[in-house]
Image (cartoon, rainbow, N blue to C red):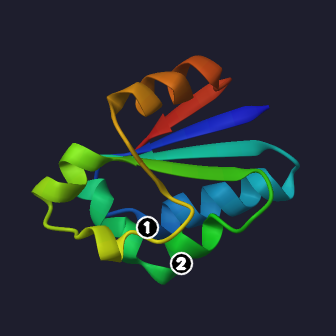
């Protein structure tokens, strides 16, 4: 199963981490997409560490990242700076999607 997680706020870091770790621990694939204030979480070490887990991929809305004042240098390697197209792909390819 593929679980999509759309992160639109920076308020639920622990929930994003916990659900991602639980899903991966059960052998599921997790696709995370960050937008709006959720982009702020890509500088959080617990969130960033998820990208190194097998079965986890991350992307963010580059437009929103810039709007939040996050520089190119602050985006960790391995997180794709994309667009709402990446969000659409996540929604199409995921069996279930959770929105925060």
Q: Nearer the viewer, residue 40 or 11?
A: 40
Q: Position of residue 17 (x, y in %)?
A: 57, 65
The correct choice, above or below, for 31 with respect to 45 in the image is above
The correct choice, above or below, for 56 with respect to 1 in the image is below
Give the residue at x 39% y 62%: 12
Classify mark 2: helix, strand or loop: helix
Q: Position of residue 62 (x, y in %)?
A: 28, 48
The correct choice, above or below, for 80 with respect to 6 in the image is below
The correct choice, above or below, for 15 with respect to 32 in the image is below
Of the image marks 2 and 1, the number of the one nearer the N terminus: 1
Q: Can the viewer see residue 86 in this picture?
A: yes
| Residue ranking furthest to the bottom | 45
Instruction: Write down the residue under mark 2.
Output: 46
Q: Position of residue 48 (x, y in %)?
A: 53, 72
Give the residue at x 51% y 61%: 15
Q: Position of residue 54 (x, y in %)?
A: 80, 59
Task: Specify the quadrant that holds the N terminus.
Answer: top right
| Residue ranking furthest to the right | 27
Q: Is residue 36 left or right of residue 51?
A: left
Q: Nearer the viewer, residue 13 or 81?
A: 81
Q: Is residue 12 left or right of residue 56?
A: left
Q: Can the viewer see residue 10 in this picture?
A: no
Q: Nearer the viewer, residue 87 or 98?
A: 87
Q: Is residue 56 left or right of residue 63?
A: right
Instruction: Write down the residue under mark 1.
Output: 13
Classify mark 1: helix, strand or loop: helix
Give the residue at x 49% y 70%: 14
Give how far apart the Cα atoms at labels 2 and 1 are: 8 Å
Tell whether label 1 touches label 2 (CB within 8 Å).
yes
| Residue ranking furthest to the top | 92
Question: Which label lies toward us, 2 or 1?
Answer: 2
Q: Is residue 16 left or right of residue 13?
A: right
């Amino acid at each position: 199963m593929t679980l999509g997680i759309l992160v639109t706020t920076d308020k639920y870091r622990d929930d994003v981490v916990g659900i991602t770790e639980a899903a991966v621990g059960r052998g599921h694939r997790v696709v995370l997409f960050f937008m709006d204030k959720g982009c702020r979480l890509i500088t959080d070490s617990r969130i960033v560490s998820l990208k190194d887990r097998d079965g986890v991929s991350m992307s963010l809305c580059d437009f929103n990242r810039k709007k939040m004042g996050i520089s190119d240098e602050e985006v960790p390697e391995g997180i794709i700076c994309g667009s709402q197209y990446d969000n659409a792909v996540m929604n199409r390819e995921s069996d279930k999607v959770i929105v925060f």
